[in-house]
Amino acid sequence: MDILSFVFETGFWLATVRMATPLIFGTMGELICERAGVLNLGIEGIMAAGCMSGWTWVFLGGTLWGGVLFAACVGAALGLLHAVFTVHLGLSQHVTGLGITMLGASLSSFAFRMILPQVTTPPKIVPFAPLDIPVLSTLPFIGPVLFSQTALTLLAFILVGVTAYVLLRTPLGLALRMVGENPLAAEAQGLSVLALRTGAVMVGSAFMAVGGAFLTLAAFDAYYIGMVNGRGWICIALVVFSSWKPGKALLGALLFAAFDAIQMRVQQQSISAIPYQFYLMLPYLCSILALITMSRKAAYPKALLVPFRKGER
Amino acid sequence: MSITPLLRLSGITKHFGPLAANDDISLTLAKGEMLALLGENGAGKTTLMSILFGHYVADNGTVEVQGKSLPPGSPRAALEAGVGMVHQHFTLAGNMTVLENIMLGTEALWGFRRGSARALAKLGWLMDRFRLHVNPHAMVRGLSVGERQRVEILKVMHRDARILILDEPTAVLTPQESDHLFATLRGLVAQGLSVIFITHKLREVMAASDRCVVLRHGRVVLETSTRQTCAEELAKAMVGASIPQATRSKLTPGDEVLFLDRVHASVPDRGPNLTELCLSVRAHEILGIAGVSGNGQALLADLLSGLVAPTEGSMVLRGQPVTRPTPAAMIRAGVGRVPDDRTGTGLVADMTVMENLSTEIYRLPGFSRRGMLNFKALASRAAQLMDVFDIRCQGKDAPVRKLSGGNMQKLILARVLSQGPHLILANQPTWGLDVGATAAVHQHLLDAARRGAGVVLISEDLDELFQFTDRIQVMYQGRLSDPENTATVDRARLGLMMSGQTFENLGAA
Amino acid sequence: MRFEPRESVALAWQIGALLLAVVAAMALCSGLILWAGASPLSAWGLLLKGALGSTFALTETLTRATPLIFTGLAAAVAFRAKLWNIGGEGQFYVGACMATWLGTGMIDLPTELMIPFLFLSGALAGGLFLLVPTWLKTQLKADEVVTTLLLNFVVLLVVNWLVFGPWKDPMAMGWPQAAPVIDNAMLPVLVAKSSLHLGFILALFCAGLVWWMMRFTIWGFEIRAVGASLKASTFAGMPVQATIVRTALLSGGLAAMAGVSELCGVKGYLTLDLSPGFGYSGIVVAMLAALHPLGVVLSAIFIAVIYIGADSMSRAINISNYIADVTTAVSLLMVLLSMFLTRYRIRWK
């Protein structure tokens, strides 16, 4: 069809990869938490917090990478809070996650308004510029698409590889997976379930926050309240869709972003017919679809949502 | 000249709330010794071993391995000291391979790569040395129970254990597999290991152990060399005062209450498919289903509970075929179901005693009217049942979670038997109960049979089956053997059938 | 550090723990007040005065509490059955849309009939709307937290389309809003010259009804049993599917009634900001009330106090009124902690 001819443009795919980046970070982060047995519903709020803190760091004069690191720390802190409630105290992972989302979102809005009380147009910062990797970026098609992205996008891709390697090939990854399948087995082998789960949640939350920071530090150049706009929830759907496998999660994020990019283009090209709001709905409906296609046979980590209480009868 | 014992537990005390699970327990273990830790359910054996291994922290007392005190609450310290434990419920992840399960925790967490090759080599050597063979690359969820136990033992040996603890190791094995296990353990002991095994089976203790320690109500009541004692003395020590055992009187069977005619059923992840099942139970009769768990008992129980429908064949209750089985339909048809999972399936843990007693009858006229519950009627029924069935609790509004295992089972029995069922499904009804509660359960089931119910008793405990059933069928891989008269059947042959040998499957014409 | 389960906890302690959670939340948020350069005590004083210090303030607070009672009940009922309905926000708008569709001139009835008619039809629409993610959960095991949440975004976009598009009121001078509901559909005011409307009474009535249902009827028993143990209630032969459907209809219906109430009682016409997050606040309201229907009334009023008071506080001190959202979020986390402390004793070893 003529309308879809843009699918062959590099510009389209460039945008796709860029838009997939926050989803990649978020999905990787959630995947790590869930593989260790903890459902982290705080992702939306953590991404908002990362978004805001990354921007604040740069706005107040810091470097871009400093902003990324600061966002990661904020994310890890929220992750620690989540872990204390769910892992150490064994409280409801659903309600704790919702509480963290509300906390992250409201604190971000509050802090933003405290720093900039009277602003209608948010002030801009200088975001990450796209890097052109020598040699690789001159390759036809995939050159500009993959290798002319911002450093954060490259980091996202590297992170997928690192996560997959750690999970599947290192003793730490084995321990993490076991903690999500049979925590008692891990304890019986001398490992600390609480420490492993807490670590997983903190690292995962740090990833999520960096995904949020990408929005202000690379994708756009300003912060406005409500920027995350449901991406966190979409990541949760993507984790199920990817069967908790990092490689599939990457594919899922790219597929999703591609679809999102398509709906934007079609919306621009369409003259009348369908109102633009319906195009904006598609990402959310697609996430629901992705979730339900994989849910029935989903191979959940066996100990997901099950708190581990040491020494209890 | 005294030799420092390999292992010494001194003055171990552990309370759970007001209950003293372990009360000032001391025992020793020498090198190259096989010690049996004996006691009925609830005596404190698993608690004691869990303290030794570091799962629990004792309130008082010390654990010393070769004279050095073990830091409490640390399985890692126990493992490093050479203590290994094979738990009653296997600590294996089904979605991972045998090798992964065994390697877990054996390497530094910050390592770059897993030393799979080295671990594989060591595992191969261990398998040969102890003659325990499993495919290291197999997924654990595809292994049989006996194979999983082998993995558990290999896991412990892989960590160079010198003291091996086994918690009820033969609970899930056929008699032949049990013999093989003890032969293996004897081999280990001959090579210098020390073994403690927890059991409540006297036969094993007399046959395999060097010394035995009997626990009762959390205290050591007897410690002796096995040669110097006998089964009767041990039994008496385990139980204390003699509890009257339920006795079976001869009854003539009445009309048929249940007939399964060449039933097939299958549910993913619920065990082997049921194939060509033929089963018949008559009033006043108790039919026993023997077999190692995991051979289809769960699916059979689901079938009789109304949770699963047969894909082929028919289920007939008192002459009426059951067309669309649902739990409610089975209850209406007079089937009483006592599930094996007391706290998960049999009871709503967060609700009260009265509410749990009411879950099957609250919709009946008399207990509710026009949508509203009749609390007075429900309360008076609850009071009556609590009295008749001797359910000990803090009142009808006590949360069921706080009840002991025995009282929970009495509650379930009360709920079931008060409806006067024609058919009773009792699935592992005395599992995990102490002798007193066990006797009570048996008595209730016998009374129900005397009143006219037919009982299907699924049990892993051959002693129980031999004591109470009229006929026995063996379940193996989803098939049932022909029914045999309990009084005349050969116990050894049953054991062979339980492991699949000499299994004659009828039903295939 | 070890945790020992407590033997039994008196009701007084449990309620005390909830109150303690609230106080702890306010104490923690005092840090933010200090950041804004004000004294916490005077700030909280301003908040309480702004919410409860005059008849007018009180009516404002109760008006704000009205939709929160409805959404709080919606969450409480659903969570009791372990149906994690996070879609209260979307169901709110479904109810408001239904009332707009039927109440802006399509149907004309006298007020005594019009109001119940709009409430019931809104409730039906909201209930049916929640059935979709519920069905996805029971049949396809799709996690309802994510589906109900994502549907919120979808509903909001539909409302966006409606108020900018087909339902745009030509007489609204360009503002994106729908036509106002007819006079007969407007909820009468309870206190002269205030915004407190009949919806508040209806909300109280619903709270009483839900409490009575959960405590005394078969349906309530089944909802509680299914929520406490799905396996055991299935095994006992309870009509589990029907119970979950009933729960969904009730929960979605209550959240939708919040939308009808706000539409017909406060604004009069559908706008994009009809709900400043009532659906999500409803979850906090329900948790603060420990899922008790009558407690929901009290915690809804508490949350309303926080929001109305924060508006007043933020006008007097230079502090963003997002402090209300932060206090609400911290309250939710504190409630979880306090519930934990009533069930476990901490032993330091």
Image: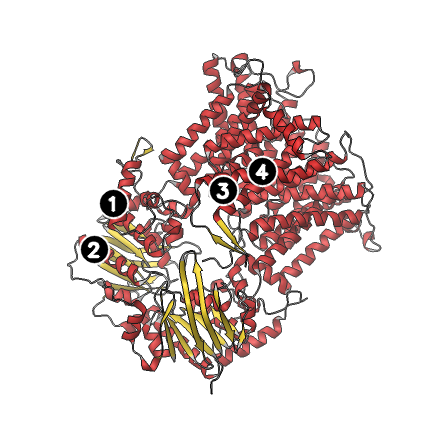
- For badge 1, the amino acid type reads Gln
What residue is pinned by disc 2? B447
Q: CA distance from mark 3 to mark 1?
A: 40 Å
Q: Quadrant of the image for the C terminus of chain B?
A: bottom left
Q: Do residues under tags 1 and 4 come within 8 Å of each other at their CB atoms?
A: no
Looking at the image, is mark 1 or mark 4 nearer the viewer?
A: 4
Query: As displayed, is residue B365 above or below residue B313?
Result: above
Amino acid type assigned to the residue bearing label 4 in the image: Val
Q: Position of residue B143 (x, y in %)?
A: 46, 66
Q: Helix, strand or loop at disc 4?
A: helix
Q: Nearer the viewer, residue C278 or B283?
A: C278
* Residues at circles 3 and 1 in contact by the CB criterion of under 8 Å: no
Residue at the farthest bottom position: B1
Q: Are marks 1 and 4 on the same chain?
A: no
Q: Are the residues under marks 4 and 2 on the same chain? A: no
Q: Which residue is mark 1?
A: B384
Instruction: Name the residue: 54% across, 30% down.
Output: C300
Against C77, residue A178 (above or below) is below
Q: Which mark is residue A6?
A: none
